[in-house]
Image (spheres, rainbow, N blue to C red):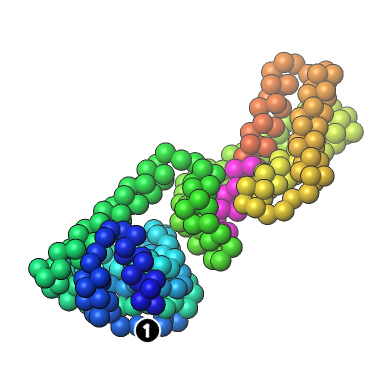
Amino acid sequence: MLKSFSQFFLDVTFIPSSSLQALFDLFTARTIEKGAYYAKVNETAKKLAFLNNGLMRAFYDNEKGEEFNKLFFKGPAIVAAYSSLITKKPSIINIQTLTVCEILEADFLDIVALYDEHPGIETLNRKIAEQFFVEKEKREMSLIMNDASERYALFQEEFPGLEKEIPKNEVASYLGQKPSAAFVTVSWITLITGVTAFLIGLYNAEMILNEKGYYFTVLLFGLFAVVSVQKSVRDRLEGIFVTDIYYGLSWFSALSSVILLIIGLWNAELTLSEKGFYSMSYILSVFSAIAVQKNTRDTQLFK
């Protein structure tokens, strides 16, 4: 473990071997079981760990019990509730193991006490803090500037293969994919509004039953087709296997439903306002179905 410990810090900055040894002597080895907390909210942190092997996450939680991942630690890495260590105030973040973890642990004040005799350790600590700040800034910018697919690509670049080691809800939480309650509600309202308006129009239309049946079938066909398209596209983005046949049929079905509606309205003995009404309510319905499917899937990832 000394070799990986030394190499990790030397990759950050050069430190004399005597300083490295003095630093290493402060650390003691221990194993933490999966699911255990290394730091908890409202507890003042006093120790800093070198994660030699394993995986941890840092996350916030709210009064509703919802959790929001801020950072993943994959060994080798430095793990600490850093703001609590610096300010000597209770931690505002939780750190939890996702696997069994092997760590080296030391009291932070003991490390600080080495600064005068070993200035290289102070430089090391400063550079690690700078790295934390840079990563924090990159993450905040990504949440603001990038969409979900771009953030997922950046996640895969930063943590290669990690999505195969942890539950998908942890990845979704880190990427900030959970839709707001307002957006979920509005999506359902627009879907119900669009479908209801279309059906009320059909019910009151002066059409024979087989014409009404045609438009009703086209509506159901369109709703199913766009949900299939959203699912297959999302599956491929997340690395879930989708056959080319199913992917192609989903798109073909979605386009066919639109074409069938256009052909039906084009040849129907309806006023332009009626044709416009059916077109708009149909578009509203299928667009809302896509949004509802997306929100449902995003929400499920958090469970």
Residue under the point 86% across and 30% down: 211
Q: Is residue 275 left or right of residue 173?
A: right
Q: Is residue 270 left or right of residue 115?
A: right
Q: Is residue 109 left or right of residue 226?
A: left
Residue under the point 36% across and 62% down: 60
> Residue 42's spot in the image, x, y percent?
26, 71
| Magenta part, dominant SS | helix
Q: Where are the magenta residues, as a range?
A: 290-303
Q: Is residue 228 above or below residue 61?
A: above
* Amino acid type, callout 1: Arg
Q: Quadrant of the C terminus?
A: bottom right
Dot 1: element: strand
Q: Which residue is mark 1?
A: 30
Residues 33 and 260: in front is: 33
Residue under the point 53% across and 52% down: 156
Decide whether residue 294 is among the magenta residues: yes
Residues 285 and 86: in front is: 86
